[in-house]
Image (cartoon, helix red, strand yellow):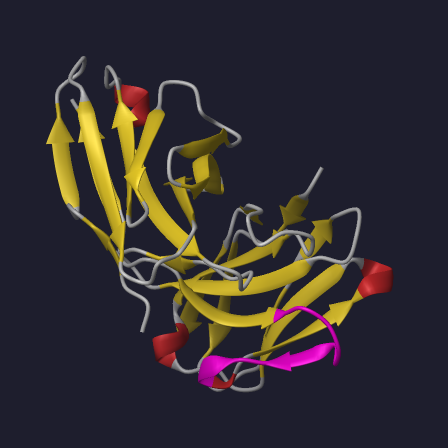
Amino acid sequence: DVKVTQSSRYLVKRTGEKVFLECVQDMDHENMFWYRQDPGLGLRLIYFSYDVKMKEKGDIPEGYSVSREKKERFSLILESASTNQTSMYLCASKRGRPEAFFGQGTRLTVV
Amino acid sequence: AQSVTQPDIHITVSEGASLELRCNYSYGATPYLFWYVQSPGQGLQLLLKYFSGDTLVQGIKGFEAEFKRSQSSFNLRKPSVHWSDAAEYFCAVGSSYSSASKIIFGSGTRLSIRP
């Protein structure tokens, strides 16, 4: 089975902190994604990566950046966390086949 | 641009009753279509997918969905729901052109089950 692991289930950070959300997949997938999930808005794509060091902006990239130095790891970075970034963050990966596999999610609270 | 609309925010059905969750998509070519389910506090699990061929697709947990190109719809159905089906359901669309393409999700439908 594909395993997508997000490093934290719950995080609490202070406004202005630099925050790293980590995602690792164990199936050699080329494509990795970061989504943000908010009630009534569904999942919105922040960034995705189709190869090492390659990235593309999704629908809501403002306030975020990403890093993909190794194929298995895709990091989401909040350079200066703000309260409106309090949300559930979901990482996903896929390869070849169109469907994506998701991690368990990280619930981030910025206070 | 790709988009997915799930018109029902919240649906409540009685246990044992049938279920239909609606999904409409906008896409310029033949899409890949998906239904995912999310239990509270969990990630998303793929229920079923449509790529081509038979327009009625079967998924896990007794769910099925029907692709109707003329209506740009991909509605999810289950003949008899169980209390364990209470969850949030997301319809999604992806590109048929590239495996590197993104997947776009609808806003979700929360399903509650009445005992």
- Please provide percent x and percent y for residue B12: 48, 66
B60 drawn magenta: yes
Which span of residues is magenta-colored? B50-61
Which residue is painted at 51% across and 32% down in the image?
A58
Residue A109, above or below B36: above
Closer to the camera in the image, A36 or A75 = A75
| Camera sees residue B115 | no
Task: Determine whether, in the image, residue A88 is placed left or right of residue B95.
Answer: left
Closer to the camera in the image, B82 or B48 = B48
- Please provide percent x and percent y for residue A28: 35, 58
Which residue is painted at 67% across and 68% down in the image?
B51
Task: Determine whether, in the image, residue A48 is placed left or right of residue A68.
Answer: right
| Camera sees residue A111 | yes
Task: Determine whether, in the image, residue A29 is placed left or right of residue A41.
Answer: left
Count the labels in the image. Answer: 0
Which residue is painted at 47% across and 81% down in the image?
B60
- Please provide percent x and percent y for residue A86: 27, 30
Q: Where is residue A81, by image quadrant?
A: top left
A94 drawn magenta: no
Residue A29, above or below A81: below
Which residue is painted at 32% across and 47% down in the image?
A71
